[in-house]
Image (spheres, rainbow, N blue to C red):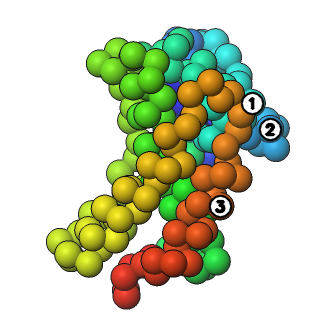
């Protein structure tokens, strides 16, 4: 399965898997459905789920039906504006935590692999203690967002991005980090 299959990396991954004859489940934002043609296909079959990286129902379906999930949805830019830091934190950071938590809740640990591109984590890999402390604080604070998802099938984009915006506002990223 691929989350973010219409982006640059996700569409190339989907195209490669399809050309090798794999059946691929993709989760894409409704406004990106038209970009599915980027994948092309010479062999495999595509099953499309519409939703964001925070669509709980989609994520539960992906987890139930697949053994490998590629989380390719990301905000990757060398010139991201400070006003977008909350969204970048939500999409690039908290989405992995959300998916991992849902895998645990579904008792699929060891049965589902979650793979994401290393470029999503570049800013959090550091030998700077202030950066590591900031990341630990963000993870600890995010527990309040993810603890009450049992029984939810909603898209929690607004809740996660709102939390990320509030977190960034109260906890600016360390100097020199974007």
Q: Earlier in the sequence, mark 1 or mark 2?
A: 2
What numbered label is drawn on residue 162?
Answer: 3
Label 3 Cα crowd, 10 Å radius (few <14 / some 14-19 / many 20+): some
How many numbered marks have been drawn onto this rendered protein structure? 3
Query: Where 20 falls versus 100 (above or below)?
Result: above
Residue at 27%, 70% (x, y): give it: 133
Secondary structure beneath dot 3 equals helix
- The answer to whether the residues at label 1 and label 3 have Cβ atoms under 8 Å apart is no
- How far apart in space, not on screen, are marks 2 and 3 (Cα)? 21 Å
Query: Where 67 falls versus 142 (above or below)?
Result: above
Question: Taking 158 as reference, is 111 left or right?
Answer: left
Residue at 54%, 49% (x, y): give it: 145
Mark in the foreground, 2 or 3:
3
What numbered label is drawn on residue 30?
Answer: 2
Residue at 63%, 58% (x, y): give it: 161
Residue tagged 1: 50
Residue 6 locus on image (x, y percent)? 66, 40
- How far apart in space, not on screen, are marks 1 and 2 (Cα)? 5 Å
- How far apart in space, not on screen, are marks 1 and 3 (Cα)? 22 Å
Which corner quadrant of the image does residue 58 belong to? top right
Residue at 49%, 50% (x, y): give it: 144
Question: Taking 12 as reference, is 39 left or right?
Answer: right
């Amino acid at each position: 399965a691929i989350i973010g299959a219409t982006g640059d990396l996700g569409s190339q991954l989907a195209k490669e898997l399809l050309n090798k004859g794999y059946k691929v489940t993709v989760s894409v934002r409704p406004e990106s459905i038209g970009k599915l043609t980027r994948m092309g296909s010479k062999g495999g079959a595509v099953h499309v789920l519409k939703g964001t990286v925070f669509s709980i129902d989609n994520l539960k379906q992906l987890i139930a039906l697949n053994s490998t999930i590629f989380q390719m949805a990301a905000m990757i830019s060398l010139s991201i504006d400070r006003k977008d830091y909350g969204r970048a934190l939500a999409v690039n950071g908290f989405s992995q935590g959300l998916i991992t938590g849902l895998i645990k809740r579904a008792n699929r640990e060891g049965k589902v692999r979650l793979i994401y591109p290393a470029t999503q984590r570049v800013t959090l890999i550091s030998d700077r203690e202030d950066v590591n402390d900031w990341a630990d604080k963000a993870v600890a604070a995010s527990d309040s967002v993810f603890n009450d998802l049992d029984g939810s099938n909603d898209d929690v984009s607004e809740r996660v991005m709102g939390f990320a915006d509030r977190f960034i506002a109260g906890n600016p990223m360390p100097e020199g980090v974007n």
